[in-house]
Amino acid sequence: MRIYGSTTDDATRCVHYATALDIVAIKFRCCGRYYPCYQCHAEGETHPAVRWPAAEWSERAILCGECRTELTITAYRQTTSCPACGAAFNERCGLHAHLYFEVPEPAPEPTPEPATVPPEGIRE
Ligand SMILES: [Zn+2]
Ligand SMILES: [Zn+2]
Ligand SMILES: [Zn+2]
C-alpha cells in the first residue's frame, strides 16, 4: 500500500498533521491514491480533490496507519478508534470531514448536480 504525500513516518503522519493521533490516511476519489491529509493531496496533485458522495461510503477508503487495515468511510465516521487494532484516531479530523466526504456541513459554494436539476419549464 503506497501512501503519497509528505509523510514523516510509517504510520502516515505528515508534515501538516503529526500528533500521536494522526495515523489515518484517506484515499481520494479523484485519483484513488492514499494521502495523509488534504494538504498533501493539494501539493502532490494538480487536480482538485473530489470528495466521496454519501452513496459511496461503503468504499474502503480509510487506512489505519498503525495496522494498515482499510476501513469503509461509514465505519470510520462511526468510530474514534481503529476497530482492528484499537489505535485512537484524531477526533478533530471530524472538523475536516467536509474536505474528504460529502457531508452536509459548511458548503460555501453549492455544487449543482445534474440529477437534481429540475426539468426545464415549458417555453413560450
Ligand atoms: Zn486526487
Ligand atoms: Zn499532510
Ligand atoms: Zn488499526
Image (cartoon, rainbow, N blue to C red):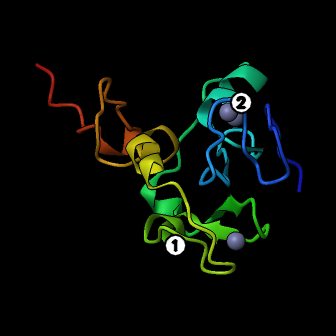
Circle 2 sits on which residue?
Answer: 15
Nearest to the observer: residue 26 or residue 16: 16
Q: Tag 1 or tag 2, which sits nearer the N-term?
A: 2
Quadrant of the frame with the N terminus: bottom right
Q: Is mark 1 within 8 Å of ligand 3?
A: no
- CA gap between label 2 and label 1 equals 26 Å
Which amino acid, mark 2? Val
Residue lying furthest right? 2
The residue under the point 54% across, 70% down is 81
Res 75 label: 1
Q: Secondary structure at mark 2?
A: loop
Which amino acid, mark 1? Ala
Q: Is mark 2 within 8 Å of ligand 2?
A: yes
Residue lying furthest bottom? 84
Quadrant of the frame with the C terminus: top left
Q: Secondary structure at mark 1?
A: helix
